[in-house]
Image (tube, helix red, strand yellow):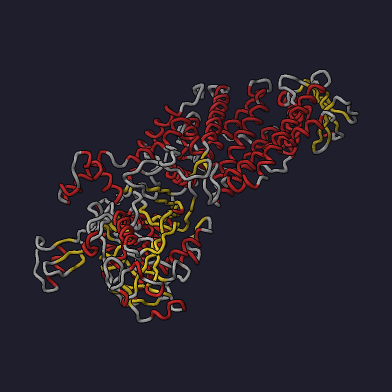
Amino acid sequence: MKSQLPDRYDPESVEPKWIKTWEEKQTFAPDSSRKETFSIVIPPPNVTGNLHIGHALNHTIQDIIIRIERKKGKNVVWVPGMDHAGIATQVVVERELGKEGKTRTDFTREEFIKKVWEWKAHSGGMIAKQQRLLGESVDWSRERFTFDEGLSKAVIKVFRSLYDEGLIYRGERIINWCPVTKTAISDIEVEYKEKQGKLYHIKYPKAEFKSKDPKTLSKGEYIVVATTRPETMFGDVAVCAHPDDARYATLKDKFVYLPISGKEIPVLFDSFVDKEFGSGLVKITPAHDINDYEAGLRLKLTPVNIMNLDGTLNEQTGKYNGLDRFEARKRVVEELETNGYIEKIETHIHSVGHNQRGGAVIEPLLSTQWFVKIESLAKPAIEVVKSGKVQFQPKMWEKTYFEWMENIRDWCISRQLWWGHRIPAYYAPNGEMVVAESVEEAVSLFSKKGISVTKETIKQDEDVLDTWFSSGLWPFTVFGWPENSEDLKKYYPTSVLVTGFDIIFFWVARMIMNGLKFMGDVPFHKVLIHGLVRDKDGKKFSKSLGNVVDPLDMMSKYGTDSFRFFLAAVLPEGKDILFDESRLDGYRSFCNKIWNSSRFIFMNLPEEFTAKEPEINSLEDTDLWILNEFDRMLGKYEKAYSGYLFFEMANAVYDFVWGSFCDWYLELTKARVYGNVTPESQEKARLVLVSVLKKSLGLLHPFMPFITEEIHSLLEPTELAKTDFPKPYGVSDSAPAVVRMELVREIITKIRNMRAELGVKPEKKCKVIIKCNHKELKEMMEREIKSILQLSKAESLEFLDSYEAKNTDSVGAFSIGEIFLPLEGIFDFEKEKQRLEKEKKQIQLEMEKLENKINNPSFLEKAKPDVVEKEREKYNTWKEKLESTVRALEKIGT
């Protein structure tokens, strides 16, 4: 077998080799010979996107699951793909055209869409290349795009089906309008941010005092209305008070007039008014506020739209026609102040809606759009979660899901874009409309209505569908729906969905609704929700903060395996990850530890060596002990995996490989490996080393695919990705050999700790005396005496039934006896005492400074909570150092 590893691990040469090999060999294609299936669909990233750290986390979690389930003998499929990302992609392409001095309108719709496809072919899909770099074990032959022909036909079919049922309709309603991208967006694409603005208290004179100079109006001649958006007052159609507000009871059936415009509007009453806000009176602007719109419907008011689609005011605003909304606000306030209509202006913190894509301030706008009646689709989707058919993990996210689903509003699905699935509605010259899956079918439907048209005389709706409309069908359209394909039968429902909490509404809920509606079953049984990756101070990654981390940089710097293992090892259940780059260096060291230990093993195997499972009954104590350690670790690993606790899995295998296997077993068996024993003992050690290494690589592989595959390739030709999940050895915790070796490890660890606490340097070898009446222990120690001497840095070991400690002895207890380290001559007690006393005073001084700081009311009042917490953490760290120093002083007799 005499294959050797290079003297150092080089991710730059290993990773590309295996990426190419896996894809060429189609290693990750599903195996139809296996009966039990397991499927995951990747949340399709935007075609415009690059791999960010959130993708890296999400995809690493999925890959761990997929690689484990493949090893467990299942017919596994993991489907990759991309979303056409309507708004984002159109913005990118328009920006590219802008560099050439052109705009979208310089092209026909068809020419522009052709440009987008050209952009996709050359620049789009970068993220798929980066996914390969991350080592994702997907079946790339199944890659899907939401604009693929088959998926596009499915989208149109679903629209037609919902329309025919009356669940899709076209109507005029308040929607969220982005004046920058000039399209409607859905409620959940609006990000609300706390902003400091102004609250304007405006005088609305009573109608009977219309002719009076507003500067001379007295208190009873006007009412005060507070608003944050005075520029919308041209769209006011009423003023409203709460029915129970006694202050305004006398205003019933009264009118006021709008400042500047002079238009008279009624004072009405509705319970949606908050009596505590402002003056308790609100302006009703139904075309520009969702609450006002709904109040307007109840009060039978006619909306007045004062806004153009680009965010400028329209002809309804007189001289302000054509002004940008924010400039208009400034000028309207100036005119109101000049004419005496402003009572006061206050600083006001309020929530302002922004487009998640681009950050433009959203304008609520009355508009004719396409909507889905969502309530009847939401009810069964709520029930499957309540019944446990779909389970959220952590369970706390079910509450978030229910809160949104139980208060859901009709979904605005139309977008004023050119890139996207065009709405399949067709209009005849006389205005009649039909919904059809093709233009030919539309002509036929018109004919059945008695309307004579041709393909040339009918016009398709200009709008496209919200991107989430198509991605909501993803779990079944990727498998060939609406065709009842073999893949659909095998892999739907999918097994688990892995996603962030931020798209529970965008995507998870819609997939559940669509799956139940069109497949008659849920799209997945488990929804695994992970947290966000934040910087080490807990802040979200943001270009504006300058704290963005590029996963590709981290992978290049530390190796992909180190990066992946870090993401899993620090991922607490349902909580956010704090990204600390220094941790990556530790996991790179772990990779090196695995590599160097494997290299040592290979270097000490003969050419004729053949790996096989060791015979348990013939093994020595150390061998049985490591097999038991593996079994115990495997149990923790599998238990953690059953709950998708990846950090527990990672830490279990990390502790075993670094600690039990490398630091203990490898060291304990070196003498046997080098041949300082019988050939039989040497062969057993080699077999156990290779067997445990192989099984450990199998458990590490889902986290660290590259380094493990490379090492395993020297052990056997079958790719590690396709080998079976490791099985336990079956060595009992109570086996005498295991009990004996645990005692040996306890003694060695105790000696090491005693030396470390006193600061005895490694090169200083000392005598060890063990006081114990346990006959069996003494006999066992004689067999392991060399190992104990080697691993505890001792020059001699003596077993005594009784022993009186000297003043210069360090004394420690273990489970069935005492350990004595005679230190006279190798350790200066007085010098160490002086050093520790000095260190103790310095620590106490630092603690005093911090204590004064964290107990200072002024500091606590002014400092941010995270700063206060950091100072407290510093104090606790110093406190631990003090306790350690005091213990060390006690050890040397102070």
Left or right side of 261 for 457:
left
**Residue 460 or 274: which is nearer the viewer?**
274
Number of numbered tags placed on the structure image: 0
Rendered-image quadrant of the C terminus: top right
**Residue 93 or 214: which is nearer the viewer?**
214
Is any atom of residue 614 visible in this view? yes
- Where is residue 445 drawn, in percent x and y? 16, 69
**Residue 876 or 123: which is nearer the viewer?**
876
As drawn, 159 above or below 27 = below
Q: Quadrant of residue 12?
A: top left
Left or right side of 324 for 17:
right
- Where is residue 562 drawn, in percent x and y? 50, 34
- Where is residue 761 drawn, in percent x and y? 72, 22
Q: Quadrant of residue 722?
A: top left
**What residue appears at the point 44 percent right and 45 percent down from the top-left corner?**
54
**What residue appears at the point 31 percent right and 63 percent down from the top-left corner?**
339
Q: In which quarter of the image is residue 277?
A: bottom left
**Residue 153 or 227: which is nearer the viewer?**
227
Is any atom of residue 176 visible in this view? no
Left or right side of 127 for 656:
right
Left or right side of 764 for 874:
left
- Where is residue 327 drawn, in percent x and y? 30, 54
